[in-house]
Every structure is written in C-alpha cells, then in structure tokens.
Image (cartoon, rainbow, N blue to C red):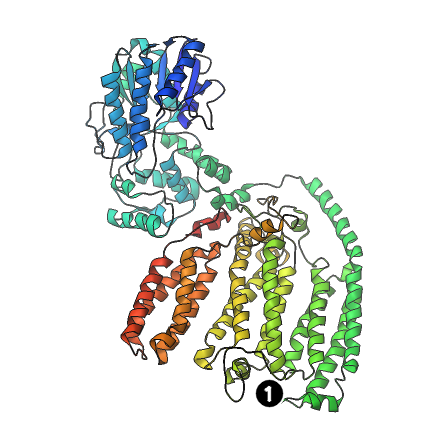
Amino acid sequence: MQTVIVTGSSGYIGKAVIARLAGQYDLIGFDREQAPHPPPEAECICVDLTSDESIAAAFERVRIAHGGRIASVIHLAAFFDLSGEPDPRYEEVTVRGTERLLKALQDFEVEQFIFSSTMLVHVPDRPGRPIDEDAPLDPKLPYRKSKIDTERVLAEQRGPIPVVVLRPAGAYDDLCHSAFLAQQIASIYERQLISHVYPGDVDRGQAFLHLDDLTEAIRLAVERRADLPEEITVLLGETDVMSYDERQKAIGRLIHDEDWETREIPKALAKAGAWLEDEVLDEDPFIKPWMVDITDDHYELDIGRARSALGWEPRRSLRETLPTMIAALKKDPVAWYRANKLNAARVASASAETRKQPKGKGARAKAMAGHGEEMADMHRGLLWAHYLVIGLGAWLVTSPLQFALFDADVALGLARDVTGERGLADPVLRNALVGWNDIACGVLLMVFGVLSLSRRFAWAQWGTTAVGLWLLFAPLFFWAPSAAAFANDTIIGALVIAFSVLVPMMPGMSMAGMMDPNTLPPGWTYNPSTWLQRIPIIALGLLGFLIARDLTAYQLGHVSGLWEPFFGGQAGRNGSEFIVTSDVSKAWPIADAGLGATAYMLEVLMGAMGSAKRWRTMPWMVTFFFILVVPLGGVSIFFIIIQPIMIGTYCTLCLIAAAAMLVMIPLALDEVVAMGQYMLRSVRAGRPFWRTFFQGGPDTGSGPDENPGLAAPLRTQLAAATWGVTIPWTLLASCALGAWLMFSRLIFGTEATMADSDHLIGALIITVAVTAMAEVARPLRFLNALFGIWLIAAPWLLAGVTTTGAVVNSAVVGLILIAISLPRGVRSRHHYGSWDRFVV
C-alpha cells in the first residue's frame, strides 16, 4: 500500500481521516509526544513542528520503515485558541511548522501535499451571494491570518510537490463536536438568558460541514491526486445555510418544543458583558469580544470546484443532523456535554431523570422483602435504646424529689434579684411547675418507650422526640429557679431525642430510599452530608450551646455574674450582664439566651442525625437544619450586631457565639442545595412532593462516594471537612473593610445615625462575605457592592458626620468594596450539579 502521512493525527479530524483511509493506505500519524496518540491503524511518529531536528528525525524514520515515496501528506496540525488574541504559536506552529515540513519533504518523492485551511480566510458576503475560491481574503483575526500566511508559504516553497488547499466549513458530527454549535445548543438546553440575545443580524449564518463529508472529500483528493492540478484550492461546505435565527428556532423546537425567541442587542452591550464576565467577574466565558465583531458575517459557499475537481458534494446537512444531535443530548446529557468539552455537572440532574431502575418488579419486590428483614433485625438489635428511654423517664419522674423542687424554703433561697426585675411568678410556684412537668414528661417517656419496643408502634418514637423537645424548652417557659432542674431537663431532653430518632432508625423513612446505597448527588464531586462535612458544624453548634447556656444561667438567676473582660455596662453590671438583662432582653417572654441555647442544641442534634444519604432520605430534616442555621442564625447575628446601637455596649460571649454561628452558615449551605436539587428531580419524575419531603427516596442518578472518609489521614479529613468553601482574598478584604467600618467611629469621631450606619453596614459586610465563602452562595457577594454604593451616599444623607476624613473614608471604603465584590475569586475543583451555573 502507498504511504500517507497525517499530521495532527490524534485530533478530532485526524482520527476521522485515519479511520476513513484505513485499509487503503500505509498510514503514518505525525503527532506530539504526549497523549492522545493516533489511532492504532496508523504508525505513531512523535514530532515537534517547531523543531528542525525533530522533523528530520521523524522523516528519517519514515525513510527507513516506508521508503522515499509518499503518496500524500495530509497536513491538519495547526495552532488555534478561542481567545482571539495574537499568539506567537500561530506563526511558529502553523506557518513555520508547515515550512519545515515542506523543506524536509524535498528529499522525498511526494505526490501530493494537502493543507487544511478554512473558509473563514475569505471576506464574508451577504445572503444570496455565495463565495468561491477567488473571493477576497480577510486576515483580520490571528487564526485566519496564520492560514493565509501558510497558503502563501505553500505557493512559494512547494517546489515540485503538488499542493491541494482545502478550505472547509466548520465541521460537526452526530454528537455535535463543534464548539460554537455546542455552546448554542447548551445555552438553549439550560434556558440561559444569553440564549435569547444575539449581537448581530440573526438572518445571517454560515455553512457547516459534516465530518463524514469532510473526510470523504479528503479521501477523494488523495485518490484523484494524479488528476488534480499542481496547485488547487477547494472550498468545502454545505450549500444549505441555516441562519442563526433558523438554528435557534430549530434547536428550541427540538429541545423544548417551542420556537426560541432571539432578540438583537447592540454589539457594545455584548462586548461589555463579555468583558465584565472575563475581566471583572473572573469567569471564563465562551463568548469573547472578537466573536461579537463577526456576528454579522455570512458565509454561503459556491462548491462548483469541489464538484468538478473531486466529484464531491455533501451528502449530509446540519438541518437534517440537528434532530440526531439533540436526541443524543436528551438521551444522555452528561455524555453529550463531556463529548463537547462542556461542564457536565450542570446537566447531571437532567441525565439522572432519564435513567431507569435496572431491576424488574419481581427482583425489586424480592429486594424490598429482604430489606424489610434487615430492618427488623436492626430494630431488635437497637431495643436497648428504647429501654434506655424508659430508664430516662423513670429518672425524670424521681428528679423533683432529688432536686427538692416541691420544697418552698429551697425555692425561696434560689430567688435572685436579676429574675425579680422581670415580674415573674413566685419561685415556689415556678419550681413546683418544673417538678410536675418532669413527672408528667417522665411518665410519657416510659409509655412511649414501651410502645416503641414494637415495630407496629413506630410512631411512638416521634412521641418520645416531642417530649424531648419540650424538655429543652420547659425550664425556659417556667423560668426554673433550680439550676439542677434546668441542667437535668436539658440533658434528658437531648438524650431522649438522640435515643428515639438518632441512634435507632428514624420511623417513616422510604424503604426504597434506604435501599439505594449511592450517596453522591448527581453532578457533584463530593457528598455534602458526610460526617466529615457535618462534624465542624456540630462542633461549632456545641460551642454556641455552651456559651448560650452560661448566659441563660445568669438570666435565670442560677449564677451571680458573667465573665466579661472588655466591655462595661450600667447599674453595676458589666457589658454582658447588662445586655442579657436589658429592656430588649426583657421584651421576650422567656429567657432569650436560653432560646439561643436550645437552638444550638437542636443544631447539634440535627447535625448528627441521619446517614451520608440524608440529602435525599431526610429532606425535611435538612430543611429545618437550614432554617435553624441560616435564617434563625442570621436573625441572632443581627440582634448581636445591633447591641451597641440599641443597648450601648457589647457582650464578649455573645460575639463569640455569633462568630461560631456565622462560620456555620457557609458550611451548611451545600447540603441544602443538594437536597433542593433532589426534590426538584423527584417532582419532575412525578413523585408526590410532601411524601418525598418527609420520607425521602432513591435517586437513580446518584453514585457511590469514593472520597476520603473517617479512615483517611487527619490532614485529608481536615481538607475534606471544608470542601465547598473557599476563601478568596477579595472576601477576606471585604471582612477587613467591614471590621474597619465598625471601629471607624472611634477614629473619625462620627456620631448619631452615621456612626450607627457604619457599625451596621460593617457587620453586614462581614456576614455577607463569610456566607459567600460557600461556593454555592458566592453570588451573594454582590450585596456588598450595594452596601458600597450606600457607603458613598451615606455621608450626604445621614447626620453625625463631624470631619471631612469621615466623608472620604466612607467613599473610599465604598469604592473599594464595589471593586472587590465583583470578581468571583478563586474557585475549587468541585462541582455542584446544575447549581454550577449559579457559581458566578
């Protein structure tokens, strides 16, 4: 067989050319040393087109193994990138690399040299005016210029070697494999806003070319090499040119069964948007400013020379292939995205919805029965937890006697002035109420515990849980004078919840959901519900509970003072004591610090509930955990922020607890996103919303989690515990600016509403910046830009500005804040399924 050399043989077109010529020619693939390598049908010879020595060595190998005669050299290798910027590699690889090849080939008997150029070297024309090979050339972009320069080198330095210059249209295949087409299809598939706008004439378009037709043209050029002129240039493309609007409507109908509406926008606006995404927001957008400039270009081809010289014309068309492309996308969105080098995580959920359960009804029923037996065995193995609940109930029944809750003299001795200020009921009555409550709750715990011993009364575990929850709140409602009773109810309440639904299996969960062993949400690179992800949240919740319990003890009169090293108060009390006894605190019907302590305890308990699958097996619990951590935590932080504004001082312990709560927020958000995605998939699959919300279920798109667990080295565990959270310097700087604002009143002497504004806005800036450290919440940083605008305007709108320095400080901080709130900052390697599109 005659020898054919294909450069760029491992590329998209190169592999297809080798597949087309395999078995007809002795094929050699010229390519770089690194992977990928040419297909096995071709001998691989590694070559560097920028090196004379490398090219000489490659052709020496050709001469030794294949002789000095070459039927055709199909030159596909070239440099290209989407930046649109000049790059020395265009000259070094495409132009000079071709020149080096020609020079080395002069020592061989070469029957043909085929160079793959592009139709884009031509100046575009208007619709209805096809371009032929003699049309003017346009070197305005680096890629096009490199092809034009290379064609000139071929004409000048080919020597006796016949040259065929092919100028093909953009290639595609049944899976697309066209960067511009893939982006257009993906934006419509995801219903992106950008898919509805276009910065050019939507009635213009360009020719495309199916990969099969392109490789057939190359095969014909090689086969007819003896009949072709010494130099010939041939345009290759489809004559049926779809306008941009036609493609939009066709894709919209195929994907969403609707005509896709596209509005033209000014080029300046499109360029500004592309620049903003790239330079300011730290995105890596596909659309570049140079692409905006060519949106009015129209390429319609005259392929008469291809017909006459090669006997070729296209047998495929984009119009006819689009349904095949879209069908492949719908069948397996993840595979389609990966094939087109797009972010597959964004469509993993959609892919999951198209999958079917692998087992038939009989096999599934058998598996369910087997799982039921496993659950029965598990219940029998955990009966000790219910016996322990019964024991805790008995302990609670006898506690009032042990703690003398019905002894009037003891109750009077416990009364302190700090509780007397609130106008509470007599301490004797309050202590007795706590005692009778303990007896009643103890009896209920024993009853529910006995019922829970039988699987028929699984609901009784929820009764035990309700009693446990009440025990956490009861000492606060009764303003328990006894510190022992308060601690006893708190501990018993927490233990009861743990041994009713934390240690045993939570009743009511979907059996199909528990049977599904997969834990990794579709499109995610890690599982946000693992113990490694939850342990930091549990630890921070415990810290907050211990602090809030101390504050509660003072409010309930169990201790005579609070630790406060920094801030002073009034009426002989330090800052912490003054705040927890202030009018703001007294406005609550129960001890507000105790309410915070209970919330922290619930966060600890809910953080520990469930397995690594809880994002789909316990959506309700993840939701309430989110409510405790984020909205309620945000309210708690806000009240602490306004302490100096409303009360006039700070509380050190409160600030520490607020810091712990603030850090918990970014750590908890990713699990909520995973749960929300699961609920959305479930609804789309037709499963009842509320049943899925309270019982959970399986997820056919999830997979096993192969990330490190508790058995991994400590350093690896620490890294995995904070996956999903990154700390860009921009957000750190925002925190620093917020802290500076909070203390700037001391430096610039601001007063009244201006001082309060600086303090409040500074604290909010810190809160937003820390929250945005969660990558799923990164867009929240734009709120700080709004705060920056307010800071610029505030000195002119508020009273209390005493110096010019305060005005300048507010304006400078505002401008800096706006500037650093726009970039996204560093992004981790992790993906969050369809939520990736919102990590902007």
Q: Residue 452's image quarter?
A: bottom right
Residue type at mark 1: give it: Val
Q: Residue at x 80, y 65 (%)?
A: 387
Name the quarter where the N terminus is drawn: top left
Q: Residue 405's image quarter?
A: bottom right
Residue 264 to residue 802: above or below: above
Out of 491 and 123, give the one closest to the viewer: 491
Residue 117 to residue 788: above or below: above
Residue 34 to residue 270: above or below: above
Looking at the rendered structure, the secondary structure element under dot 1 is helix
Residue 800 to residue 808: above or below: below
**Residue 430 falls left or right of residue 352:** right
Q: Residue at x 76, y 71 (%)?
A: 445
Q: Which residue is mark 1?
A: 418
Query: Residue 823: in sight, yes or no?
Result: yes
At which x and y percent is residue 283?
Answer: 38, 48
**Residue 212 falls left or right of residue 517:** left
Out of 453 and 524, give the one closest to the viewer: 524
Q: Residue at x 21, y 29 (%)?
A: 129
Out of 737 and 402, give the one closest to the viewer: 737
At which x and y percent is residue 175?
Answer: 44, 32
At which x and y percent is residue 821?
Answer: 37, 59
Query: Residue 620: in sight, yes or no?
Result: no
